[in-house]
Amino acid sequence: MSVWVGCIVGLLWAVTAQAQSSEPPAQPQSQSAQSQPRAVAHAGSGEVGLAGEFPDRYRGLDLEEGGQVPALYFAAQTVPAKGAIVLLSDAGQGAASEFAQGLGRRLSDSGWAVVSLGLETPASGLERLLEEPGKAPGGADPAKSGKESVMIDVMKGKSPDDAVAAYRTRVLQALTAALTFASDEGYSRPVLVGVGYGAGHVLEQAVAQPGTSTLVWVAPDFYPADASVLPETLSGAGGLSVLELSPGERMDEARRRSVAVRKSGFPGYSLQPVAMASPPGEASAHAVANRILAWLAKQNP
């Protein structure tokens, strides 16, 4: 009996080994799959995979110091085109956010080419620095209290001022890349649109790189250091026209900002309330686009 059992066990082992050896080996990933372009998560959330998800709209914009920033491009759908718009989303929102896509489609259908950028969320320590009253671009030195621990925890050896400056510079480089792309497409003076905290960055870009004369702020937010010098910053930027679109729930804040700007003597500021969510989502895109289009038509009759 033991002989028969041994024979049966040996036979089963041989059959199993033969079945395993006959399985085809795992195939390596094809060269085409390995070489498929990938978006780099540079500005805003959800950027990785944009090239695959939006192959017709995705653009990798070259930065001056190397690398690329991911963007979506909505080509103007009329001939001739009316111009170009560079759209910077709110902090933490990507180039393909629902609001950015809705706004981009509506504006492009009306004859405007749109380059959409995301805005990276500042690291927690950096966000605390930005939320402190202190040094705006070109302003006075910031208060030092509490910054040393933030620097050690988050900034990896950079001074607080250097960390804030590096963040702002990255955003400006992305905006410069978008403006360069628009210029290469044949648009000489693109409109800059900033959503939420993007509003302060597009203003900084307009001041740092003259050539943009038209700004739109959508439900804007400003860091304290920027808000404290906003009237002076606008007054020093000659030739700018600024449209602020504010949700009804934030109109008190917007009106105070409007009064301060007008007292500074800046003539090119316009405030309009809009029935939209704060922050704006896809449902708000149509109303916001209509306000922008109507205002731009008056700026460029």
Image: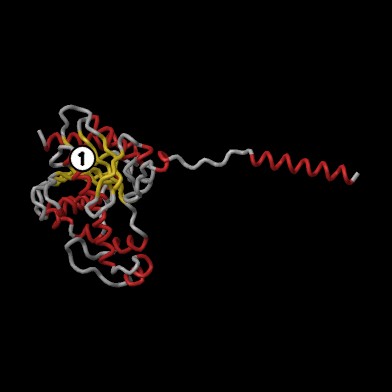
Q: Is residue 4 above or below residue 63?
A: above
- Amino acid beneath label 1: Ile
For mark 1, does the 10 Å Cα neighbourhood hold few (<14), some (14 to 19), or many (20 or more) residues?
many
Q: In x, y percent, where is residue 225?
A: 23, 61
**Which quadrant is the C terminus positioned in?**
top left
Position of 151 with respect to 242 (left or right) is right
Q: Nearer the viewer, residue 33 or 79?
A: 33
2 left or right, relative to 280? right
The front one of 174 and 274 is 174
Q: Nearer the viewer, residue 56 or 229?
A: 56
- Residue for badge 1: 85
The answer to whether one can see residue 200 in this image is: no
Where residue 181 sits: x, y (%)? 20, 42
The colour scheme applied to this rendered structure is secondary structure
Residue 79 in which image quadrant = top left
* Left or right of 183, for residue 87: right
